[in-house]
Amino acid sequence: MSSLLAGKVAVVTGASSGIGRAIAISFANEGAAVVIADITEQPLEGGESTLEIIARAGGAATFQRTDVGRWEELDLLIGNTVARHGRLDVMVNNAAIYTGTALLETEGEQWERVMRVNLTGMFNGCKRAIQQMITQEPRHEVRGRVINLGSQQGIVTCPGDTPYGVSKAGAIYITKQIAVDYAKELIVCNCISPGKIVTGAPGLAQDPARLENARRRTPWPRFGRPEDVANAAVFLASDRASFITGSNLIIDGGWLAG
């Protein structure tokens, strides 16, 4: 283990699987005390839980079942984190669901479910974390850091996919608004927008047509890995990112540069 995040307390939502899992493990490897928040402890990819992996490596982590779309559960998550660790240094709002339908094929219930998790969940996480952070003494000029997970689909369109893209565009916007509104309170807020990241999760992510489209559009000769996003999150969570706020860091192998 190195110590880039030594002494920091971090909450990562959606941390049982995929990108959130990689972020939580990387944070723990860098010395952070990590709270894993998800609706289930079992990873979609199968295998060991995030908590088991971190514990086996000698890291510090706890798991709390959390539905990010419910304010009372986010409130309890942050309250328990502060009761255990004394403060909250980093909040990573990663939890999200994906459906993949065009406008006319999207049912109202489906739209509301995606927005409830992806956007309301992010609002809940940002608001409750910042409520706590502004009460804390600064460390290295910062009271707290918020990292939101957007997507390149919040910047450019993906064929036949309305709800997810709209929710991720919202993630990018709320990041900028928070960064501007709370800079004087010494709150840092940034967004990470991945391109095609292969997580091993089943479902639409493995659709051959979608994979082929992503392969054609990505200049770098491989798809992204969860660790590519986690490395960026570690940097943004660290004191090395000292004058970066309101940014949207794109990790897409050059897709949007083409």
Image (tube, helix red, strand yellow):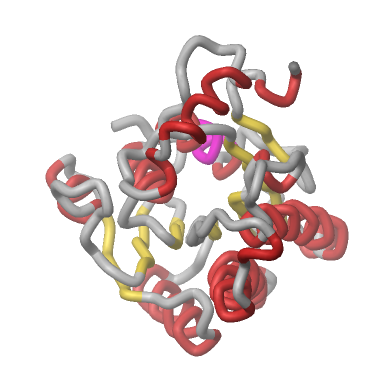
Left or right side of 201 for 106: right
Point out residue 135 in the picture as x, y percentages from the top left corner: 65, 75
Outermost residue toward the bottom? 72
In terms of depth relative to the viewer, which is nearer, 134 or 51?
51
Q: Residue at x 42, y 50 (%)?
A: 20
Viewer-proximal residue among 131 and 95 = 95
Magenta highlight range: 231-235
Furthest residue toward front:
104
Position of residue 28 relative to residue 42, above or below, is above
Tell which of 117 and 176 is nearer to you.
117
- Residue 232 is one of the magenta-drawn residues: yes
**53, above or below 1, in the image:** below
Residue 233 x %, y %: 53, 40
Percent from the top left, x then y, of residue 51? 22, 55
From the image, give the main secondary structure of the stretch colored magenta: helix
Q: Quadrant of residue 91?
A: bottom right
**Going 59% across and 57% down the picture, which residue do you hit?**
101
